[in-house]
Image (cartoon, rainbow, N blue to C red):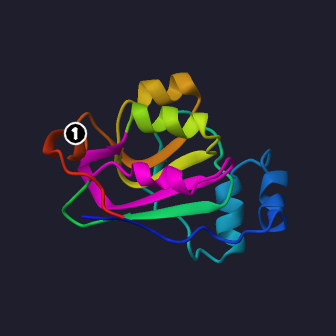
């Protein structure tokens, strides 16, 4: 089992700046989606699960191993303040791979938010921390890591 991360992007602040300048625009995701001619736009089932706040920043992407949904703590080895953590959890909705611990760690690291193609939990903690999460689902079932004793490989 692995936590597979793409290398940290060499993003220039100039690429992100125009989006941050539009933060007050209503329906910003729709405006950007239209400008991108509907390419690389999130699906309709991805919804805010904690606070309704725009998440803008360079994406640090994580691809979990199919059938082995685990905590992705290794993302904090490369994430920097202002980054957005984007997790491909294969749309798994029965096992949450992001919860209160991850929200707290991310907030303390200055992460702008998390986008999860899968499930999250402890959304009340994320709300209290004012940490934005967008995910396909939310539910109480935790990731395998806490119960299996398995650790992530690098």
Q: To which residue does mark 1 refer?
A: 146
How busy is the neighbourhood of tag 1: few (under 14 within 10 Å), some, or many (20 plus)? few
In depth, the one of 23 and 9 nearer the eye is 9
SS of the residue under disc 1: helix
Q: Is residue 84 magenta?
A: yes
Which quarter of the figure has residue 138? top left
- Residue 31 appears left or right of 22: left
Q: Residue at (37%, 30%) from the top-left corner?
A: 122
- Residue 151 appears left or right of 23: left
**Highlighted magenta segment, given as a residue range:** 70-98
Residue 139 % position (x, y): 28, 37
Residue 125 % position (x, y): 45, 25
Which quarter of the figure has residue 100? top left
Q: Is residue 36 magenta?
A: no
- Residue 60 appears left or right of 136: right
Quarter of the image with the N terminus is bottom left
In depth, the one of 39 and 120 nearer the eye is 120
Residue 40 % position (x, y): 56, 73
Q: Residue at (83%, 59%) from the top-left corner?
A: 17
Residue 116 % position (x, y): 43, 53
């Amino acid at each position: 089992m692995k936590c597979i991360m793409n290398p940290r992007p060499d993003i220039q602040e100039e690429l992100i700046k125009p989006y941050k300048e539009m933060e007050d625009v209503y329906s910003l995701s729709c405006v950007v989606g239209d400008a991108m001619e509907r390419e690389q736009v999130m699906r309709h089932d991805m919804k805010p699960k904690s606070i309704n706040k725009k998440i803008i920043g360079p994406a640090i992407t994580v691809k979990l191993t199919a059938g082995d949904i685990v905590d992705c703590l290794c993302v904090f080895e490369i994430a920097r303040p202002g980054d957005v953590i984007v997790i491909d959890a294969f749309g798994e909705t029965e096992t949450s791979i992001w919860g209160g611990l991850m929200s707290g760690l991310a907030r303390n690291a200055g992460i702008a938010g998390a986008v999860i193609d899968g499930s999250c939990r402890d959304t009340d903690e994320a709300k209290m921390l004012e940490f934005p999460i967008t995910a396909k689902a939310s539910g109480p079932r935790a990731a395998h890591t806490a119960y299996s004793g398995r650790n992530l490989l690098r």
